[in-house]
Image (spheres, rainbow, N blue to C red):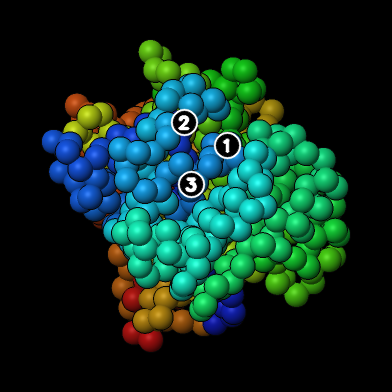
Amino acid sequence: MTNTLTINADQGTQTIDPHIYGHFAEHLGRCIYEGFWVGEDSDIPNTRGIRNDVVEALKRLNIPNLRWPGGCFGDEYHWKDGVGPREGRASIVNTHWGSVTENNHFGTHEFFDLCELLGAAPYICGNVGSGTVQEMSEWVEYCTHTGPSPMADWRARNGRKEPWELPFFGVGNESWGCGGNMRPEYYADEYRRYQTYVRHYGGNKIFKIACGANSADYEWTEVLMRRAGGHMDGLSLHFYTIPGVWKKKGSATQFDQAEYFATLQNALKMEEFIQRHGGIMDRYDPKKRVALIVDEWGTWFDVEPGTNPGFLYQQNTLRDALVAGLTLNIFNAHCDRVRMANIAQTVNVLQAMILTDGAKMILTPTYHVFEMWKVHQGATMLPLHLWSEDYAHEDKQIPAWSASASKDGAGRIHLTVCHTNPSQSATLSTQLRGVKAASVSGRIMTADALNTHNTFDNAEALAPRELNEGEARLEGERLTLTLPPASVAVFTLETGA
């Protein structure tokens, strides 16, 4: 049985929006405090309180945008408590995540500073659940008004005379759940009202994102598009991958092949969700003006033993790398509708890029996938046809292969591939249509054990390596790839175009 892939290099028309590769930083556990923010007096090297090692590592991913401050936290966050002299800021109890008390030292100014250090576009999620229309309106004015105005003048007194650019604004978060337990009809009306006062000040144009559905709640999408579609630029979708059930999700590192298979099988449901939610959107928006924004996605396991259950700290293995690669390949394939996404979350929470322990920092396998896949950002998506054998476990099966291809501005073709079968290596025979490649290079990430992960004692247990001899053979229009079990890979084809 032969696995075959045809890349139609002469047929690409859609651009893979860089914002598909976005990230999420909520006030949750150690994501903000210790993950990003250590304070100016910390012994950990920092720039204006933001730790340098984390910023430098994340810059290598070309992070396009960063979503903040939540998440569920966002619908309890009152932004005015987080501006002005830090010693005078009011504290807040984070009732969603561990009931810890936060001192609000990381607020609006610090968030924009972080985005500037990262080179990332700010994406603020506003408070609909417990906030007011006026509060949200004044936050936008504070950030973007050129002045003079009450909020712009206050911003200047707090140390920032010039307005910031705020390209993305979410009007509420998970309004069907932690953001207010609203019905879709009620939220649609609230969205219409709140977004009215999210103003475009000066030259700042805000892309307004409505709270969308939880996983397979297609009624929510139907109601929102019918009642409020004309007032939004984007509609969100949240979906988390778990191998078990919510009350017992399973361990991040101690799992068998059945749990491995279930995790990948569930991750692949993203394809169905995008197709079905996108189909509903197509009925109301056939020209695809409204983007589908998957601004929370990733794996969710039980927390690491001995850690605060409200901090959602989990390790990150080869299994997570495959989930990330499979999901990003799906997003690329649907880039006509999916134009932004945010993995949850960036540091120390859920499927993180980075884990920290005091002054120590390690990169996760998921970080490496984002670094490998970044070649697709802003490139032209190339249509492809993949015929894959199945990876079967007991009486169930999923495709053994997943692939995504794009062409960058220099004419290089980039191919990202996931091989899901954990038991055997396999070969993928690839035909290049419409282009002649002169050379191929690439990197692969795999390990002998599915639960291989990086630790503070062994930070390089799992990282990409260069190709071994025979893993990629280019002969005319035919590229033959041989990948190890349970692996992810990126290949670059130089075409001379």
Query: Image height check: is 303 above or below 482?
Result: above
- SS assignment at label 3: helix
Residue at (67% x, 66% y) in the render: 233
Instruction: Tell whether label 1 touches label 3 (CB within 8 Å).
Output: no
Residue at horizontal 53 percent and vertical 31 percent from the top = 300
Q: Nearer the viewer, residue 278 or 333?
A: 278
The CA span between labels 2 and 1 is 9 Å
The amino acid marked with disc number 2 is: Ile
Disc 3 target residue: 80
Element at badge 2?
strand
Q: Residue at x 78, y 42 (%)?
A: 217
The mark that comes first in sequence, 3 or 2, is 3
> Which residue, given by chain and number where applicable, does mark 1 sit on?
76
Q: Amino acid at mark 3?
A: Lys
Measured from the top left, where is residue 257 in percent x and y?
51, 25
Q: Does residue 462 appear to the left or right of 165 in the view shown?
A: left
Mark 3–mark 1 Cα distance, whole angstroms, equals 12 Å
Q: Is residue 130 above or below residue 434?
A: above
> Gap between marks 3 and 2, in whole Å?
12 Å
- In the depicted structure, whether residue 334 falls above or below residue 380: above
SS for dot 1: helix
What is the x, y in percent for residue 14?
A: 59, 75
Q: Is residue 11 left or right of residue 305?
A: right
Q: Is residue 496 left or right of residue 384?
A: left
The answer to whether mark 2 and mark 1 are in CB contact below 8 A is yes
Disc 2 target residue: 92
Q: Position of residue 251 (x, y in %)?
A: 48, 20
Question: In the rendered image of this protein, does residue 204 appear above or below residue 64?
Answer: below
User: What number is the disc on residue 190?
Assistant: none
Instruction: Name the amino acid type tagged 1.
Output: Glu
The quadrant holding residue 122 is bottom left
